[in-house]
Amino acid sequence: MSKVATIEIDGEKYEFPVVEGTENELGIDIKKLRAEAGVITLDRGYKNTGSCESAITFLNGEEGILRYRGYSIEALAEKADFLEVAYLLIFGELPTKTQLDKFYADIKEESTVDEEMKKILDGFPKSAHPMGVLSSLTSALIAFNPSSVNVDSAEDMYKAIVKILGKFPVLAAWTLRKKNSLPLNYGDDSLGYVENLHKMMFEKPGKSYKVDKEVIDALDKLLILHADHEQNCSTSTVRMVGSSHAGLFASISAGISALWGPLHGGANQAVIEMLERIKEDGGDTKKFMAKAKDKEDPFRLMGFGHRVYKNFDPRAKIIKKSADEVLAQLGVDDPVLDIAKGLEKEALEDQYFVDRKLYPNVDFYSGIIYRALGIPVEMFTVMFALGRLPGWIAQWREMRLMKEPIGRPRQIYTGANLREFKEVEKR
């Protein structure tokens, strides 16, 4: 027997169906609430509102569970590479060897960008934030690919997907190279996806490219860990924009802008800025741990705890190992990273943080890795966007294939009542 929920308003009772997910999540389907009862629900920030039914990512914050298409994040980070995970998220199943080889070959085929895009990039000052540049360049791809995607054609959808996966790393690398006054370049067909990205970002003119395996492995894991995270701010934005039947490139561009905010993708940048502040103050981690515990002190310890994960961030456990390996391999001598290690040690041993389950999260460790690799702090969110790209694509594709209606939230109006208009002389 199907479950129903009863809502009583002024003595009148209304019944609504209860939807159950495959992991026993329950949701009340209230789409007829306004029509039948004349009311709407109010849920600021949509913290308790399901905007869709999705088969892509399962997240249980209370138990620290994250799965892509049913596969645990732990298994994927250990056994898969980023392109395998991208294929899984977008198409629903892990690729065969033949499918993966074709996927990568097709992406490489699309990994050049129209030369006129360089003129657009030239228009930005070096001081421009890389996320603003990346969002603009992604949106500009529409001008060079004006035909809309026929979502009913599997071939058209596939072409659009490999196109953005091929061009996006080039645009991301170019934003960094412009900032660092390096000539714009392209990748190397003999390299893997992540190594190619690293080469495009860091290759210096006249010098042979060489990088440690530990570095590529850490980057690969970071991209996998960021690939999707259910209906967060940027993902919801991609689905909302796409629900108007805006194209894939425009929807992704909107997602980049949403990710830019310090409360979302900018969190790992905030971690490094906090560490810099501690260093400038003398580097006393105990002092700042005490400030973090003082409710009267405005200081916030960035990179600890998570608004979704109430126990631990499963991604942090995975990437901590990579962070330790990268720092050991590179032998980086950086007082800021030393402060980070000190904060991590104290937080894991301090009863105040242990009792409140305020463990280091993925943003804490990703910021450490990016800094160790020489990635400027302004580029951290660009790296996040590179990882999140497959998730955005998967969510956009799912939304369009499910033919979801255009997003149109309601509101409770709290403004002035009807007022009489007065001529300017009488105001």
Image (spheres, rainbow, N blue to C red):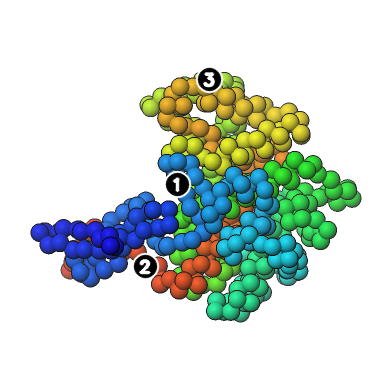
The image shows residue 271 at horizontal and vertical percentages of 56, 37
Q: Quadrant of the C terminus?
A: bottom left
Q: Amino acid at mark 2?
A: Arg
Q: In which quadrant is the N terminus drawn?
A: bottom left
Q: Secondary structure at mark 1?
A: strand
- Of label 1 and label 3, which has the lower sequence position? 1
Mark 1 or 3, which is nearer the eye?
1
Asked whether the viewer can see residue 180, the reply is: yes
Q: Residue at x 51, y 40 (%)?
A: 313
Amino acid type assigned to the residue bearing label 1 in the image: Asn
The crowding category of the residue bearing disc 1, from other C-alpha atoms within 10 Å (few below 14, some 14 to 19, many at least 20), is some
Q: Secondary structure at mark 2?
A: loop
Where residue 408 is drawn, which disc sits there? 2
Q: Where is mark 3, residue-wise?
A: 286
Query: What amino acid type should be assigned to the residue bearing mark 3?
Result: Lys
Q: Nearer the viewer, mark 1 or mark 2?
A: 1
The residue at 36%/58% (across/down) is 20
> Which residue occupies 74% across, 42% down?
215
Against 152, residue 283 (above or below) is above
Residue designated by label 1: 60
**Considering only order in the chain, which callout, 3 or 2, is on the residue closer to the N terminus?**
3
In the orientation shown, which residue stands out farthest toward the front?
1
The 10 Å Cα crowd at callout 2, few under 14, some 14 to 19, many 20 or more, is few
Measured from the top left, where is residue 292 in percent x and y? 46, 27
